[in-house]
Image (cartoon, rainbow, N blue to C red):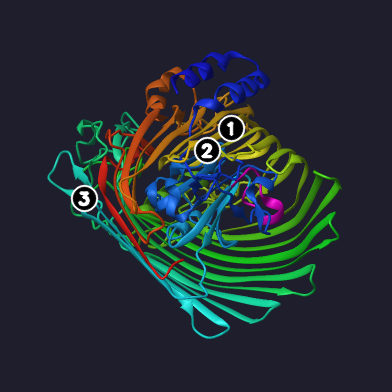
Amino acid sequence: MSSALGVSMRISSKSPASRVVVALIAVGPFIFQPPCFAQTSSAAPLATSDAGLAEIVVTAEKRSERVQDVPMSITAATGVELQSLGITDTSQLEKLVPGFSVDKTSYGLPVYLIRGVGFNDSSLGVAPAVTVYTDQIPLPFSAMSRGAIMDIDRVEVLKGPQGTLFGENSTGGAINYVVAKPTSSFEAGADLTYGRFNQTDVEAFVSGPLTDTVSARLAVRNEYQGDWQKGYTVDETNGEEQFHNARLLVDWKPSDIAKFELMVSGWVDHSETEQPQDVAYTPLVVGPTARVVPYPVASFPPAPSDPRAAAWNPSDNLSQDTHLYQVALRGDVNITDQITLTSLSSFERYQLGLPIDWSGTTYPIATEVDDGTISSLFEEQRLDGSLGDRWKWMVGGNFEHDIVDEQQNFNPLITSGTAVGPFDFDNFRIDNAQGIISKGGFGSIDFNFAPGLTSQTSVRYTSQDRSFAGCTRDYGNGEIAAAIGFLSSQLTGKPQTIPNGGCVTLSASGVPLPIVTGQLNQSNVSWRESLNWKPNRDTLLYANVTKGYKAGSFPTQPSSVASQFNPVPQESVLAYELGTKFTTPSHMMQLDGALFYYDYTDKQLAGYLVEPPFGPIPQLVSIPKAKVEGAEFSLVVHPYANLTLSANGTYLQTRVDRNPPDPTGPYGNSTSFVGQSFPFSPNWQGVFDAEYRFAISGSLQSFVGASSTSRSATSGALLSGAAAVAEEEAYLRVPAYTTLDLRAGIEPINGPWRLEVWGRNVTDRLYVTGLGRTSDFTTRFAAMPATFGVSAQYRFGAH
């Protein structure tokens, strides 16, 4: 791997085109991915055997196809392989997916990025750039994806804009979990994991026929873990996990031409929220106008380089109350032998109750509870079919109605800036209610020009109407009402009074408003054109050009002026991709790669805005022009029946090319963002994996494996670059890291059970999963420390 990294460093000074080409040639052979997976754009296996690498079938284009035949970059893996890697949540897919990374908002909620494309905003009701689906049913907001990995058949991760078939808000890509389906005969199984910090995970399922036409599958999962964070200044612990998940599938096949599937699922999370680590305390306001903070925060020691170390107010209740339930119905009817009608309907209800201590100290100085609900109704109807051997087509439409209601409760927030004149305030609330109606129509045509030569064209029209009502509000004690009322009086020259519990957001002229309202109505046309050539069954060359969009939204942030609730507009991307998928005739090796270039307009990126009196607040910055360019490779080698080596790597360059009007840096400095890279977009990422299997008797086999994940340093936000704030900017750098996972196990050859011992992050490496500054506090989230344990699996009645 060091050779590959050296090449990446040496080519950094070359032209953009040269960097991409050289990275594709040089990095690919060295950066590895776990075995038995469908690679970046390949069909790597469900399993390996003496015959070589097996194939996998995906539904990336909403029809069943070999992944090797799909002209786009895809990573796919089975549920068994996810378990072996310890992947139980979408945020852990960076162990598997080239170019996938995760950031956390200031509340610890996940932000998914693919090839540097994501959307980091702390609001509950913002649309992501990477959307998660369960059997093509959207989980439209990232926080809803927590329980998606349970009893799944496989995961499919689609790279690049997926707006034509999957809809907007997938400019980075889409993640589709395909759940395990009811079986035609009785099957049951159980999985048990026990690990460090008293981790106890239990998952079980039962499946089989109920009648001649009805079958069902019930799966349940319980995750428990004891406290893993520990106070480094006081004897306190935090981090207990209590998560419960369940899913019921009922299949009804009334005839040979019709099939219906009902899915009812839900989960409850009463875990303690992970608390951030203190990086630095930097008062926003200094001098006579600064508020005197009644705690020695400036002398509080920053967190040591220990993933377990943290600090929080010991009197706070840190247990969250978050849950989701979902009801979905799918119907497939074969109208003719060539035409199928598919209907997808779903309703989801999500509730968030998440407490967090923003300060990273033990003082009662910055505590918040984020409460909110989401209701989402989705409907899609589509027809797909074929005309002879040369034409495939699809046409359809969908409708989505989302209602989001969020309240961020600051109780207290005491900083150097939480004062106006003689008035201090410790408590306030932010309300953000949004109603979102999205409508879309789409179609696609595949045409086979000649044997092996195919063009694909797809297009979608989308319109979205988004309404907003909200403001920053007094907590009921009159503190911030008095402070902002005083400010309003100063601005207008007239006495102004804001009632207790009232809205404290002011108009442009400084007059208090009863509520802030807004409307954002936008539409777009996304499209994709692909030309691909298959000279033989195991080789594919493709070229794609795609136009994609991500919806705009209204922020949830402390705001004394109504203009700070102005929405960020939709972003658009024009993406180019060249790729290849190749499997040797013996199926002993797969080698896949892609070159890509994204041209962005109005890219939504994470920055900061200094908003008196609240301080530096995370703020979306709409960048007029930006770009992404890069290359990725995947390699799976199965040279012997008992040995698998695999590798993946992504080389990435992101860049801001044009400043927004009147750009504001993260600490209030007028600055230029031109030349800066996107936050949480490392230049390179890679995974190396090796697994060796050997017989220990005529009926038993054993295996040993190791996986190492690496990525380079990146930034946590757009930075100002001013010398006066160089030290603060250094706090917002995300360091490079490398982690090591180990595994070993035993199982019968084609038997019903499996036993595995494992270690994850065995070197106990501290690496950052989220980083930001709010007001006077710069904090980070750290990944789990070294863990180790044992997992057991048993299946009944399976063939």
In this view, the residue in front, 447 or 241, is: 447
Residue position marked by numbered label 3 in the rendering: 197
At which x and y percent is residue 746? Answer: 31, 50
Quadrant position of residue 331: bottom right
Quadrant position of residue 773: top left
Q: Are marks 3 and 1 in contact (CB under 8 Å)?
A: no
Residue 289 belongs to magenta span? no
Three-letter amino acid code at the position of disc 3: Phe
Three-letter amino acid code at the position of disc 2: Pro
Quadrant position of residue 160: top right
How far is mark 3 from mark 1, CA to CA?
37 Å
For the N terminus, give its image quadrant. Answer: top left
Residue 168 belongs to magenta span? yes
Q: Residue at x 76, y 48 (%)?
A: 527
Three-letter amino acid code at the position of disc 1: Glu
Other-residue count near label 3 (Cα within 10 Å), few / some / many at <14 / 14–19 / ≥20? some
At which x and y percent is residue 631? Answer: 61, 30
At which x and y percent is residue 114? Answer: 55, 41
Q: Are marks 1 and 2 in contact (CB under 8 Å)?
A: yes
How far is mark 3 from mark 2, CA to CA?
30 Å
Other-residue count near label 1 (Cα within 10 Å), few / some / many at <14 / 14–19 / ≥20? many
The stretch in magenta equals: 158-170
How far is mark 1 from mark 2, CA to CA?
7 Å
Residue position marked by numbered label 2 in the rendering: 98
At which x and y percent is residue 270? Answer: 31, 63
Residue 412 appears in the rendering: no
Residue position marked by numbered label 1 in the rendering: 632
